[in-house]
Amino acid sequence: AQTVTQSQPEMSVQEAETVTLSCTYDTSESNYYLFWYKQPPSRQMILVIRQEAYKQQNATENRFSVNFQKAAKSFSLKISDSQLGDTAMYFCARLSGGSNYKLTFGKGTLLTVNP
Amino acid sequence: EAEVAQSPRYKITEKSQAVAFWCDPISGHATLYWYRQILGQGPELLVQFQDESVVDDSQLPKDRFSAERLKGVDSTLKIQPAELGDSAMYLCASSLEENQPQHFGDGTRLSIL
């Protein structure tokens, strides 16, 4: 089975500091998409950032940026100037094509931002 | 911003009973998904619709689970009979097309007693 691996079950960071969450994946597809989703406690899953595999430039959304290493199949998320509201479960996900597109999630990283 | 609506938010029922969840996707979104999320894990796809047609139900336990999207808009997921192992969060998501980002609802937290 093609998997998405998040090797850090839990992480913590001090407010205003920078933190990086890791994700690796495997796929046999040439065209695919990668996402980071955020799920705060008891709240809905929200899209943080997306990356198309055919784009070499790393995606950036305000304080959130990714380091996409296609050859290494690595897709890490960097959060700068961490805020208390960033406390959440973060899921890395891969959307692969083929006969139909399917979104596969990692097991998640619980990030706690400490004041 | 338009959202995916789900109801109920919480459901507690006894094993062997029937339970149903409802989802209304963002207007205009052709693709609708039902996921099951066990506590501490990522969501796993149960069924995917393109308009009113099922395009992937390979992970749906068809002996007890059913899903429909009759008019290609809102959708219902049913479990009959419910088992203890069905306790989980059930998430609905929708996207404009299948290769576009998915937008999630708040989910239904199901507890089977």
Image (cartoon, rainbow, N blue to C red):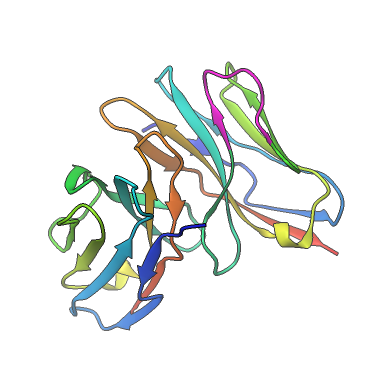
Q: Which residues are magenta?
A: A50-60
Query: Is residue B87 within the magenta segment?
Result: no
Q: Nearer the viewer, residue A57 or B112?
A: A57
Q: Position of residue B111 (x, y in %)?
A: 36, 77
Main SS type for the magenta part?
A: loop
Q: How many marks?
A: 0
Q: Residue at x 82, y 44 (%)?
A: A18
Q: Measured from the top left, where is residue A85 in percent x and y?
A: 72, 61
* Image quarter of residue A42: bottom right
Q: Could you tell whether B9 is left or right of A108 in the image?
A: left
Can residue B1 be seen in this snapshot?
yes
Q: Position of residue B9 (x, y in %)?
A: 41, 75
Task: Give the quadrant of the C terminus of chain B.
Answer: bottom left
Answer above or below: position of A25 versus B17.
Answer: above
Residue nearest the viewer, comparing A91 with A47: A47
Position of residue B93 relative to residue B89, above or below, is above
Q: Relative to A56, is B100 on the left or the right?
A: left
**Residue ID at (20%, 67%):** B78
Left or right: residue B69 versus residue A97 is left
Q: Is residue A56 magenta?
A: yes
The percent coordinates of residue B61 (x first, y second) are: 20, 55
